[in-house]
Image: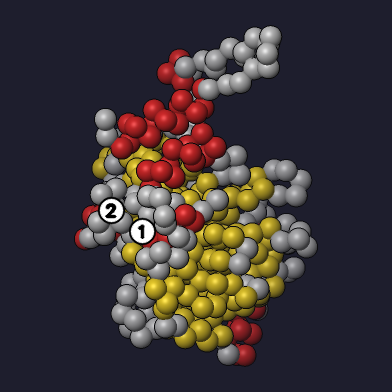
Amino acid sequence: MNRSLSLISAVWILALSGCAAPGEAAEPAAASPAAEETAPALWSFAASEDAIRPESCEEGGTPMRGLLPLQLSIEALNAKQSEVLTARLPEGAALAGAWELTSTDPNFGGLSGIALEDETTLLAVTDAGGWVKFGLDGAAPAAATIGYMRGADGKFLTGKTENDAEGLSVRDGIAFVSFERDFRIEAFDIGTCGASAKAVEIAKLPATYEGRAIDPNEGPEALTLTPAGSLRFGFEGATGSLSPLGDVLWDGSAEWSGTETANPDGFALVAMDTVSLPGGEDREIYLYRAFDPLRGARSVLVWGPDEADQLTLSRPVMTDNFEGLAALVLETGELRLWIVSDNNFSKMQRTLIYAFDVPL
């Protein structure tokens, strides 16, 4: 039995097991997902967590294993740059900080996805199969470590087909990563054994949309683990400027949800996150990107349904190829949003991290 099948079996043993008090009849089992054609059962973090951990980590690992200190220079935007950026913010929103990151380490760069590991740690993936872990001082990135992803066999991921990591979501130490080229989602228990965590395949993702093949470089840029524990993915492009959304199902398959993001004209989806608001409802946040030689890189960050719930970044704002997004509901009731740019390992581009506090 291969690793994916063993994981699915373990998940469903856990999910279907139930306990009844002595003398009580157990609740009847839920209908088979195959019988619910209109509402297939979704993949569940709660049902999968205990099966992922032993597949990903051997005994004796530590959270910092395989992560090395990274020489990093963190420079805040100057007063004029911050002023220009702040002028773009809608009423009620505030700049929590903006920084440019550089390093003498040639392996630093290409940050394509970010997620909060906890309230003091920001985790990033690179589109060359790397991990970068930042400490946080408030909203600001601080000391960092770097490591490299491993496949299910424990060997480092190599080549663009294997290591083109894009989307990232983290819960209880398990990082979920979506990959372009070979469209898939894999899990890594980095909270237990750091960068030595082996990949556990969660799902293969669709390669076609409405009967048309998807370009290998327009795949699952966006990934979110919802508060309820299901996995949603979003593709950068499929037909024209459409960015379709999909869900991972209970059996490790994936399907389109029948919805597409409301892309601004000429933009494509590159990241999303989901938070639970104080009132109990979920809120999805989206990051869109566009580029052309005349106007350069442009981004639109959307955190709500109204025009006041979005931010457009374009010249003369210092901007770049923003691809990663992470969100946190603060104790004040505001929403803190971090975005990160992918410099494509090019000296002509920048690695930027911006943080905004926005009203809900």
Indicate the quadrant containing the N terminus: top left, top right, bottom left or bottom right.
Answer: top left
Is residue 20 visible in this depiction of the protein? yes
Disc number placed over residue 196 in the picture, else none: 1
Disc number placed over residue 94 in the picture, else none: none
At a point 41% along the width and 78% down the height, the residue shown is: 70
In the rendered structure, the answer to whether residue 236 lies left or right of residue 29 reads left
Give the vertical position of 26 relative to 176 (above or below).
above
**Residue situated furthest front in the rendering:** 60
Q: Amino acid at mark 2?
A: Gly
Q: CA distance from mark 2 to mark 1?
A: 8 Å
At a point 47% along the width and 68% down the height, the residue shown is: 133
Residue 160 x/y as whole percent: 24, 59
Give the vertical position of 234 relative to 85 (above or below).
above
Give the vertical position of 105 relative to 289 (above or below).
below
| Helix, strand or loop under label 2 | loop
Residue 153 x/y as whole percent: 25, 49
Residue designated by label 2: 154
- Depth order, front residue of 210/345: 345
Total label count? 2
At a point 48% along the width and 51% down the height, the residue shown is: 174
The answer to whether the residues at label 2 and label 1 have Cβ atoms under 8 Å apart is yes
- Depth order, front residue of 130/322: 130
Q: Amino acid at mark 1?
A: Ser
At a point 37% along the width and 50% down the height, the residue shown is: 58
Give the vertical position of 273 relative to 202 (above or below).
below
Is residue 253 visible in this depiction of the protein? no
In the rendered structure, the answer to whether residue 302 lies left or right of residue 190 reads right
Structural crowding at the residue carrying mark 1, measured as other residues with C-alpha within 10 Å and reported as few (<14), some (14–19) or many (≥20): many
Residue 270 x/y as whole percent: 44, 58
Structural crowding at the residue carrying mark 2, measured as other residues with C-alpha within 10 Å and reported as few (<14), some (14–19) or many (≥20): some
- Depth order, front residue of 165/307: 165
